[in-house]
Image: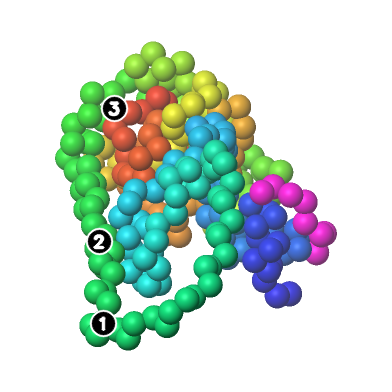
Amino acid sequence: MPHCTPEQLALAALREPLPAADAAHLDSCARCRAEVASLQRGVDALAVPALAAPSTPVPPPPAVWAAIAAATGVGTAPRPDVVAGAAPATPPAAPAPPAAATTPPAAATTPPAPAPGPTPATVTPLRPRRSRLLLAAAAALVVGVGIGAGAVALGSRDDDGGAAVAATALDPLEGSGASGQARVVERDDGTLVLEVDLTAAALRDGFYEVWLIDESVEDMVSVGVVQGGRRVTLPLPSGIDLGQYPVVDVSVEPLDGDPTHSGVSVARGLLET
């Protein structure tokens, strides 16, 4: 059977039902499931209230219009009220008809001065990513707190097929109040997924992200985005060694576009196989 189409993958990422044949293929195809999981990361991040809520339009900086003018040859920038998304205070007046010419125009003796060119756009360098050493120092403050083994029975089958091969309770850190369960399930095709049930307060200015971390808190792998009160299934990277990354960590990530760990963890557990 051919792979799911991009439209079907998008619907699955939005958790919309698929036709029976496509749903069956998705359940058995690791490639399509990985694509859906990748799309779901964006869907779950956009479900953060701070991103989903409508807000007042923000006008782009002048350098943006300067770059557009340089690329298109347009020398006039939009009016400020149009840039900001507001309606103009009064409609523009219709241009007056040209007056009848009484004398022929004088011949031009010099070419007109060229219009001033647009200001070149400026490029602002992105700030460097946080150092893993700084992250390790921050996380080391809480690494010894609340790491426990879950009570999930290993070897049990899940609803989609596969057996749990490792599990842990997610214990709160630093009085966060977050808690939950995590278990690693091996599917019938040999792929591994991490099922996470998280109980945590909703965030307005960030989101929760799940990581697998080594016990020295020096190396880590991002698994995906989760929300409190909802079970999520996150595919694990092919060939990952759970013995090397046995710690399941849930962090609070700000909406800053930085893909590295924020250093703020709310729940953590040590996988028991």
Residue 215 placement, left or right of 162: left
Q: Position of residue 138 (x, y in %)?
A: 22, 29
Q: Position of residue 180 (x, y in %)?
A: 52, 26
| Disc 3: which residue | 143
Give the Cα separation between the discs numbered 1 and 3. Answer: 74 Å
Residue drawn where x is 25% and y is 67% of the image: 116
SS for tag 3?
loop
First of labels 2, 3 by sequence position: 2
Q: Position of residue 160 (x, y in %)?
A: 70, 48
Residue 212 placement, left or right of 232: left
> Which of the labelled discs sits on residue 211, or is there none?
none
Residue drawn where x is 38% and y is 72% of the image: 73
* CB within 8 Å, label 1 to label 3: no
Q: Residue furthest front?
A: 102
> Which of the labelled discs sits on residue 111, or is there none?
1
Nearer to us in this view, 235 or 95: 95
Instruction: Sort mark 2 into few (<14), some (14-19) or many (20+) by Cα contacts within 10 Å.
Output: few
Quadrant assignment, res 230:
top right
Residue drawn where x is 38% and y is 52% of the image: 241
> Which of the labelled discs sits on residue 119, or is there none?
2
Give the Cα separation between the discs numbered 1 and 2. Answer: 23 Å
**What's the amino acid at mark 2?**
Thr
Q: Position of residue 164 (x, y in %)?
A: 57, 42
Residue interval drawn in magenta: 14-21
Query: Magenta includes 17?
Result: yes
Majority secondary structure of magenta residues: loop
**What's the amino acid at mark 1?**
Pro
First of labels 1, 3 by sequence position: 1
Residue drawn where x is 33% and y is 63% of the image: 67
